[in-house]
Amino acid sequence: MTIGLLIAVGALTSVGVFLITARSLSRIILGFALLGHAVVLALVAAGGEAGEPPLANRVSAETIANPVPQALALTAIVISFGLTLFLLALARRQQELTGDDLVEDDLEDLRVAQ
Amino acid sequence: MIELVFAIHVVGLVGAAIAGRRSIQGALRVAAIAPAATTIWAAESLLSGREPVSASMTWVEQLDLELIFLADSFALMMTLLVSGIGALVFVYASGYFAVDARGSIRFPVTLLGFSVSMLGLVLAESVWTVFIFWEFTSITSFLLVGHKLSDPSAQQAAWRALMITGAGGLSLLAGLLVLTDDVGSVLLADIAGSQTASPLAAVLVLIAVGTKSAQLPFHSWLPGAMAAPTPVSAYLHSATMVKAGVVVMAVLGGAFVDSQTWQWLGLIVGAATTLWGGFVALRQRDLKLILAYGTISQLGLLVTLLAVGTSKAVFAALSIVVAHALFKSALFLVVGEIDIRTGTRNLDELAGLHRSMPVAFVVAVLAGVSMAGIPPLLGFAAKEAAVEAVLKLSGIEQVVAFIGIVGGSVLTVAYTFRMLAGLSRSPEDGRTITALAFRPAMAIPSIIVAGLGLVGFVLLGTINGIVTPAATELNAGSAVYELLRWPGATTALMVSAAVVLVGSTIGAAIHRSETATVLGEPEPVAARVSDASIDGVLRLSRRVTARVQHGSLPVYLLTMSATVVIAAAAFLPAVSVTHLEWAETPVQLVLGLAIAAAAAAGVQVRTRLGAALTLGAVGVAMSGLFILQGAPDLALTQLLVETIVVVGFVTGLGHLARTFPPVTQGWLSVRLGVAVMCGLGVVGALAASSAQPSGSFPAADLLRESVETGGGNNIVNVILTDMRALDTLGEVVVLAVVAVGVIALARTSRSPGRAQ
């Protein structure tokens, strides 16, 4: 782990949380994408020091980078990609229906509270 | 055999549900068959003196959860009462609901459901079986008390009963957990034989007993439960359900023989309850309420005796359980009959009842004399046993028990006398009560139970044959005792004579001053307190719901993020920076700072293009970092994914707003605070965990496995497609679902009207 990576993870997390708590759906999508990056980077950074690409026919066991977090990170990248695309489609739908992209309070929840 | 008993009840439930569609009377008669058959089985088993039968059924094997039943002498005695009186109550109810021509499934099925719950409780042999059936009785009782849906007071009484007995159920569960933990067995026989005497378990179990058996200060639900139809009151609130607490106290009593907490708490609460219940019963005018408070008083008597716990006291307690079940159910049945036929239960309006309803009056006298403990009825023999048990004690324990039992008995005689005197008084203006026609279905069950009090006294040997083995089951020393028809001129008899004399004097005095009403109707303070606390809990829950379920997505997300910060606080002590270096290569630091800068720009982004640029910059820098880290697969995937997302953002999939609304000022400082804390929390957790590396990863093994088993040189790919193949399949499915969702949302876009 290096300070350079920590700064990147910290900034991505902070900005991500700040954006997902916004009212604008577009910002929420941006926030989720940034949070996804933060998680992937944290996973890879937690895997240990940098090394050679884990290709069995090219490198020896002493110098390769840890492949397990890479595999986990690959899954995380793809899933957050799917989530981002779906949110984009939802935002587009909302834009068509209401003309804005604000997340309103849930009326059903409000009714329960009363 | 026990399985068969439960099977008969299940058949009865189905039969009652089918018959109930046509008429409630038919359903009640069908429902009576199951308890009647059970009564015959219990009586036959008791008289034959066979070895007790048992049954068990595995429920959750992994948790070692089993339903275990054992029909020992005590369980059979209780079964006889529960099912015997149950069968009669079903017949009685068919008369009670005679005018109700409509079909009804709810009442017969719930009442039979209660009957089988109570049966399960008395037959239970493991603590979890006890708990489950205990809760079943609470729930069915709630449904029965609230039977009249249109009556708000009945609904409120049902809630009160459910809240109080439900809280007691939780206490019982906690107590049973402590007991099983101490003893290491879930079988009641092991627990009763353990003499663990844990004070915590004693208090928890006694609270449960107190709620179910209406002891001070949990009694308030029982008078309220009189809002139920009278068959329910006669069955649940005199003979059976209120005895559930007493039953649990009796079967667990062995564990607490040496427990001072158990003895003193039970003794004081029981004695106070028996005195208080008797005193309030004296002040009531509603016949049903007189009986309800009388029941509280009698239950206090039982708790006192069981808390004392000597062999004689246990024997006396069980004798009273039998006698009380008979006379109290008879009295309730008669009061229900009076209520139905005259339209009132008020003592003031029922003067001269002995003329207009002679049969009912005779039944009331028979049962009342048994309740007062006067020969020649079963109540006399039982009360003698109780007085003798107290006389055998010593010290302050004897004083408290004596005050409770003798004082309670005096009050019992007094309110019985007042009630019977009130019913046989000649009406002042000479008018007679107009009573509806005689209903055999209502009268015969009450005659049978009241008559059993007399027959039981005559055939005392049979009663001894039931009670003595049952008491021996709970306390081995009880084997030598038996109920006596005439004890001879003992101290106990002198005490009893004095009790009757003083009690009837008080009763007569109150009866004479009835019109003047010296004491007046008591205020139901306890009921109001418990209602207020139930209302308070409901209000609190509404307020909490309004607070936590407010419907605002940003606030939900803020709450979750703040929780993450709290979770990260666990890492704080381990945070260290000494092991950290700035970067492995200068380029890494540059890329890290570039990501941070691009992210920071995202805070203020106002346009779709800006957002896309932010994402693109972060994505490209991430790819660079992956290459430095030695992860070319990640870098490639990241570049590809980022390209698609950026294109998606820029084109906005056609319709996205070009500019974003300005950053709203509401909650801004909170959002910033939580966001910064979240970033710091994650950084802290990473810094802490990297300070204690878990060692190197098995690189050589991974290399070998990848080539030999997976047949691939790219280890990351082998992990994804071979070692975690199922996971990857799930991921592919997720992507497919997303694709379908995106297409569906895009397709419907041109016709928003239809989509709504």
Image (cartoon, coloured by chain):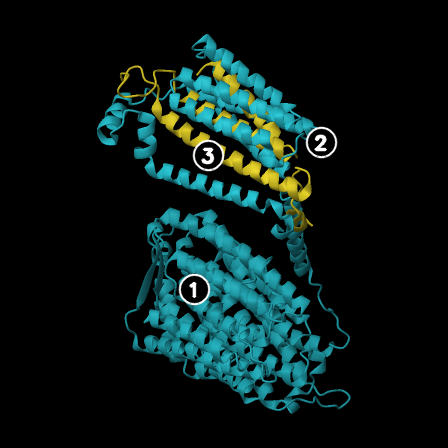
Which residue type carries mark 3? Ile
Asked if badges 2 and 3 are on one and the same chain, I answer: no
The secondary element bearing badge 1 is classed as: helix
Query: Numbered disc 3: what chain?
Result: A
Query: Numbered disc 2: what chain?
Result: B
Give the CA distance from mark 1 to mark 3: 53 Å
Of labels 2 and 1, earlier in sequence is 1
Mark 1 neighbour class, 10 Å CA radius: few under 14, some 14 to 19, many 20 or more:
many
Residue B51: % across, % down: 28, 70
The secondary element bearing badge 3 is classed as: helix
Residue B157: % across, % down: 63, 64
The residue where tag 2 is placed is B666
Write down which chain is painted yellow: A
The label on residue A79 is 3
Front residue of B692 and B385: B692
Give the CA distance from mark 2 to mark 1: 58 Å
> Where the N terminus of chain B falls, by quadrant?
bottom left
Write down which chain is painted cyan: B
Identify which residue is drawn at 58% across, 58% down: B164
Front residue of B594 and B748: B748
Q: Is residue B369 visible to us here?
A: yes
Which residue type carries mark 1? Leu
Q: Between tags 1 and 3, which lies in front?
A: 3
The residue where tag 1 is placed is B121
The answer to which quarter of the image holds residue B77 is: bottom left
Mark 3 neighbour class, 10 Å CA radius: few under 14, some 14 to 19, many 20 or more:
some
Residue B461 versus residue B184 in the image, above or below: below
Query: Numbered disc 1: what chain?
Result: B
Residue B682 versus residue B268 in the image, above or below: above
